[in-house]
Structures are given as C-alpha cells and as structure tokens.
Image: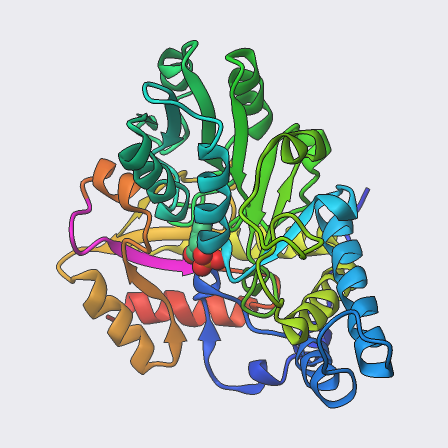
Amino acid sequence: MAAIALDVDAVRARFSALAAPTAFFDEPGGTQCPDSVIDAIAGYLRESNANLGGPFGNSRRSDALVAQARLSASSFLWCDPEETIFGANMTTLNFALSRTVGRTLAAGDEIVVTRLDHDGNVSPWLELAHDLDLTVRVADIRDDTTLDYDDLERLLNDRTRVVAFPLASNAVGTVVDARRVVELAHSAGAIAWADAVHYAPHGPIDVAALGVDVLLCSPYKFFGPHLGVAYVRAELAASWRTYKVRPAHHRFETGTLPHELLAGFVAAVEYVDSIGWEAIQSHERALALRFLSCLPDRCTLRGLPGLDGRVPTFAFTVAGLSPRTVAERLGSRDIAVWDGNYYAVEVMERLALGEEGAVRAGFVHYNTMAEVDRLLAGLEEM
Ligand SMILES: Cc1ncc(COP(=O)(O)O)c(C=O)c1O
C-alpha cells in the first residue's frame, strides 16, 4: 500500500510561527504550535477563565474543559481518562510520582534506569535513593547506542522495584523496545516506568499495548503548550497514598491546573489527529533518509546509521569544530540546532562526548526537504 503523502505546505500554513525564515531543527527541545493551539489558549482566557466548581458559566465551561482535556489525554495515550494526570512538565511530574511511589519502598530496594534516559528520568530516582537508602543501577547501551537488554536483565533481582526507561533517546534518537523492557521489568516484579517525551511527536503511544505501568510526556514536544502529562495504571495508582490537599478530588494534581494550557493541549491532540501518524512517519523518514545519505564526510554521526530503530533525531560532531561553534554558525544562517548534552547525561558520557557534547538536529513532520538541504549545505560550507 502506498504511504499517505503529507502536504507539507498545507501543514505549514497552519503555523504562523513557520512563516519565519528559521529552519527549526530544535524539535527535541520543543516544537512550534499551530495557530489552533494558540487560539484555543487565548479563547479560554477570553471566554471561559475561572476556577472549577462554581455555579456560573465560565466555571462550568472550565469544568467541561478539564474533562475534555482528560479525554484528549486518554485518546492520545490509549488509557482511561481517570488514569491521566496533568502537571507543569515531565520532570516536575516525575519528581512527584517517584516521591509518591517512594512511600512503598524500603532501604535496600533497587531502581534500574538506562543510559539512554534523559536526566528527568534519572535524577528523581537518585534523589529518592538518597532519601530512602535505595540503590540505583544503570543499564548500559551497546556501541551502536541500542539498549543492552542483556545488561538490563542482569541488573534485575528480587529487590528491583522500578525499571525506568525512555521510549526514545532525546540525544541519539534510538528507540527502545518498550515491550521487551516491560516484560523484563514485570518478570522481576518491578513497575515499568516509561519516559515518552521524546517519542511523542514521532509515533502513536498505546500504554495498554506497551504494558507500561507509568508513562510521562510533555505536550510542548508535540505541538502543544508547555505542560506535562502522565499516565498511571489505575490499580497501581489506587495502591499509592498520594500527596494531596484533603478537599481535592484528583488524587495526584496539587492546586489549580493551567486551564488555558489544557485548552491548548486539547487543540494539539486534535491537530495531531488531523494529520495522522502514517503521514507524519512517512514524511519524517524521507527527511531522515536525505540527511543520512548526504551528511558531509567531516560530520560523524553518533547513533544508528540507518532509519530503523530510531526517530529522526541526529547527534553528530564536525571535525575541527566544537559543537557550540557549529550550532552558532548554523544559527547565524537561521538554522536552529542544539549543542551540549541536552540533559542526556548518561549517553553522552558513554559516548565519551564530554562537556561539549554534540550538535543535535531533530526533524518533525513540518520540516521540509529544502530545510534539510539548507542544513546540509550549512554543514558543507562550514
Ligand atoms: C526524553 C526526555 N525526557 C524528559 C524531558 C524533560 O521534559 P520536561 O521539560 O517536560 O520536564 C525531556 C526534555 O527535553 C526529554 O527530551
């Protein structure tokens, strides 16, 4: 069957931000928002702004909006609306949720994380380990940046309580075989705790099919506003004593939610649905193929060399130039890329990329072939 083609010009016409001359390859740090998201945020503040539970129009509309946001999160993650949790961002939610599960842990219990994790899925466990005298073990990667599943299996034992892992690396783009990790975690009696932040703009997430117990993501990485969303499997959530104020209905959310951002989130999920994953993925693959096949010789890619097992996020170094210099020179040509370690501390250490890290270019479906060619020309002429 032929892949569904993406009309990238029609897509870009939906984003005022993409009228700028900038080629945005900073997607792993956050995506641009379509106008529908911006309008939804402004529209909420104009027409519905209020706190919840009041017997008047704006408050009733706010109640309905929060209910709709849970429905949108549940359709995005394929879970029950009651299993969704909103917060400031992934990291803040992860500190809160890890602290909550910490109430069920005891000194000597163990947590496994991976070298592919962003620090947002590592430091919450290190801090919990500090408080509770737990042990945190780090599953290694193989030289090609894929997760070393044998090493992960070796680290599991009858004290392992949580296995924390990413669906995809925000540094090198490697995708993790989540089902395999979940099986390993569950066979050890541990909770499978997934960071979906980097994967979310690139493919569908079905928490039930993956079998994860906890999953976190950030709508600002998939065309929405700065916000965090988490899923906790209902039976697991029910077994935890949460940190909450007594009158609050939701067991995990503390205080008033950013309603206007929830309105933007609803519009972001509608936006993704309106494009469809098949069209998104076939366009991303075409961009990635061009980049990988035309990368200048003086650039060294750090990560999988082909399209399989990865999302189109590329970390690379350029001979004779620091990553910062490369990013600055591209920046002066209005090409937005990142440099450094992007908080992916473990993988960058493992790849011996040290303090300077690498250049990172991340593609999403709104990028064009012409932009990829501009990036390649910028690297060639550096
Ligand atoms: C893979 C991954 N996990 C976690 C985070 C942290 O997300 P947030 O900024 O929502 O805390 C990021 C942010 O870049 C990320 O890329």
Given residues 42 and 60, the one toward you in this image is 60
Residue 273: % across, % down = 78, 59
Rendered-image quadrant of the C terminus: bottom left
- Does 115 lie within the magenta span? no
Q: In the orientation shown, which residue stands out farthest toward the front?
A: 246
Residue 309 appears left or right of 84: left
Given residues 30 and 331, the one toward you in this image is 30
Give the quarter the ligand 1 occupies: bottom left
Residue 48 appears left or right of 344: right
Q: Is residue 32 above or below residue 21?
A: above
Residue at point 75%, 64% (across, down): 66
Residue at point 20%, 46% (across, down): 353
Residue 166: % across, % down = 48, 39
Residue 217: % across, % down = 56, 51
- Does 359 lie within the magenta span? yes
Q: Quadrant of residue 340?
A: bottom left
Please indicate, yes or no, whether residue 3 appears anywhere in the rendered image.
no
Residue 80: % across, % down = 78, 43
Q: Which residues are magenta?
A: 353-362
Q: In the orientation shown, which residue stands out farthest toward the bottom?
A: 46
